[in-house]
Image (cartoon, helix red, strand yellow):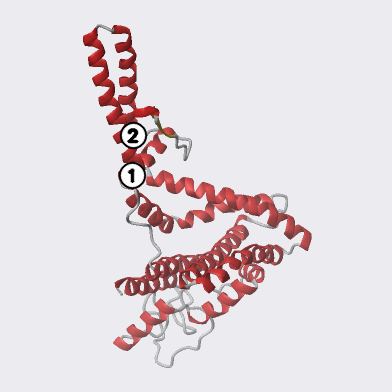
Amino acid sequence: MSDLFDGIGTASEGGLFARALEPDSGAKRPHPDQPDACRNCGTELTGAYCQACGQRGHLHRTIGAFVHELLHGALHFEGKFWRTLPMLVFRPGKLTRRYIDGERARFVSPMALFLFTVFLMFAIFQMLGITAPADLDRSGVDTARTAAVEALAEARTERDALAQEGSSEAAENLDDRIDKLNDAIRQIDEGENYAFTGKGGNTFSQQINLTGIDFIDRGIVKKWRTNPSLMLYKLQANGYKFSWLLIPISIPFVWLLFAWKRRFKAYDHAIFVTYSISFVTLMFIVTSALVIIGPVGAVIAGFLPLVVPVHLYKQLRHAYGLSRFSAFWRLMVLSVFIWIVVILFLQVLLMLGAF
């Protein structure tokens, strides 16, 4: 039950955060009781809002007004949200193009929508209990270390016995094995790659190359071996906190698709990318919820990922005014770029998790 209330609170927090980026908009008549001058900057008012600073002309100072603004800001973005959401789902290209062309007051801004979807995903996952597992098994690492310690004790016993018998050459060979086993134990403890032969000729090894940067990989592996559940939790938390990095990582790849078309600017690509990621986040939320519901939901969820390339095609075609062929080949190239972006983002999360 506490997870449910935590989730509702997080969703409301997301609405308030997005609300801060996306304030009131649209035409509104002056209030009959509003003052002649703005109470914030002193500019003479000519409408419902100050033309200099944007503050409302008429300000409420009642508890009812406070509660109204709280609910209004937390649970929706006025009528703009309900204008934006259907277009994001069914007409993403036209939404992107209209926003780029200047229809900002009618729609929720891409960044506000993106922040809201990320908060919503966190809240829904909390309510559904979708989180990093807390009881991951460390038996593989523990088994390897135990095997190395046992093999080391056996090798030392054999060496001492051979030394008493006067077999110095065989004892020296065992010294080399003892050194290797000591190195293996140190490597296991410090999160490095290891390989050794234990008792009975059993081989134990682990070769991990996550980022290609040795000290980062060691940090990741050491944390994983120490507390894998905590490591996964931190990766999940960093995924929420740094999800905005997907936007700057993606923009250069979209720019490559239109590098020879000067009429499309980086701003256009930023709007395209942010709306697209917002939609994919919503799809991910719906898919995850359906999987939790039961077998029927899981079957439906299995088909939902097929919607993403169709949505991306429509957004490309109408946002950039492309022909069917131009939109299709760009979709194919962008599909490859998406995997590169995901890999780069995961690399960033792993690097953050190493420290």
Q: Position of residue 81 (x, y in %)?
A: 52, 77
Left or right of 69? Residue 88 is: right
Query: Closest to the observer: 132 or 177?
Result: 177
Quadrant containing the C terminus in the rendered view: top left
Q: Position of residue 301 (x, y in %)?
A: 55, 68
Residue type for callout 2: Ile
Q: Which mark is residue 139?
A: 1
Query: Closest to the observer: 68 or 104?
Result: 68
Q: Position of residue 140 (x, y in %)?
A: 36, 42
Q: Which label's residue is closer to the chain start, 2 or 1?
A: 1
Residue appearing at x 46%, y 74% in the figure: 23
Label 2 close to label 1 by CB (< 8 Å): no
Q: Quadrant of residue 327?
A: bottom right
Query: Looking at the picture, does residue 238 appear above or below residue 72?
Result: above
In the rendered image, which residue does mark 2 sit on? Answer: 188
Q: Quadrant of residue 196?
A: top left
Residue type for callout 1: Ser
Quadrant containing the N terminus in the rendered view: bottom left
Query: Looking at the picture, does residue 238 appear above or below residue 103?
Result: above
Please tell me whether mark 1 sits on a helix, a strand or a loop. helix
Query: Looking at the picture, does residue 256 appear above or below residue 3?
Result: above
Residue appearing at x 26%, y 12% in the figure: 162
Residue appearing at x 68%, y 66% in the figure: 314
Q: Position of residue 261 (x, y in %)?
A: 72, 53
For the question of whether residue 189 can be seen, the reply is no
Left or right of 272? Residue 349 is: left
Please tell me whether mark 2 sits on a helix, a strand or a loop. helix
**Residue lying at the far left of the rendered structure:** 164
For the question of whether residue 252 can be seen, the reply is yes
Query: Looking at the picture, does residue 105 appear above or below residue 204?
Result: below
